[in-house]
């Protein structure tokens, strides 16, 4: 398992936090997600044999938020 903290721009409310959380949780290979709205990040635990960091970024961006790489 690998854990990454991903900085996210554009989250402004509880709906935003929930959208990012659900998008990441629903990916195969993701085992744990913690989204922090005030500090604008998601901490994700995932199996890098099943999913890549780029896949996580894409899921966040598909929800309309900007990943700060």
Image (cartoon, rainbow, N blue to C red):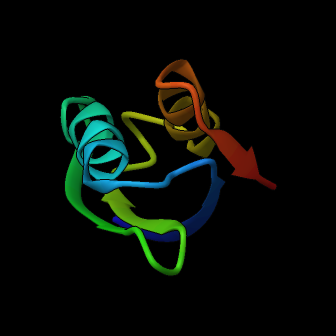
Q: The N terminus appears in which quarter of the rendering?
A: bottom left
Q: Quadrant of residue 28?
A: top left
In the image, 7 versus 15, the foreground residue is 15
Instruction: Classify 35 as above or below 38.
Output: above
Residue at the location (36% across, 54% down)? 13
Residue at the location (64% across, 35% down)? 54
Instruction: Classify 52 as above or below 69.
Output: above
- Percent across and percent down for residue 3 are 43, 71
- Percent across and percent down for residue 19 are 30, 37
- Percent across and percent down for residue 29 are 26, 39
Residue at the location (45% across, 78% down)? 38
Instruction: Classify 38 as above or below 47.
Output: below
Q: The C terminus appears in which quarter of the rendering?
A: bottom right
Count the marks: 0
| 9 to the left or right of 41 | right
Q: Quadrant of residue 23?
A: top left
Residue at the location (51% across, 52% down)? 11
In the image, 65 versus 58, the foreground residue is 65
In the image, 37 versus 1, the foreground residue is 37
- Which residue is most to the top? 62
Instruction: Classify 22 as above or below 39.
Output: above
């Amino acid at each position: 398992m690998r854990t990454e903290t991903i900085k996210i721009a554009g989250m402004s409310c509880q709906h935003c936090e929930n959208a990012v959380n659900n998008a990441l949780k629903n990916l195969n290979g993701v085992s744990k997600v913690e989204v922090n709205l005030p500090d604008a990040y998601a901490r994700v635990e995932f199996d890098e044999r099943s999913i890549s960091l780029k896949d996580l970024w894409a899921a966040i961006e598909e929800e309309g938020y900007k990943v700060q790489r």
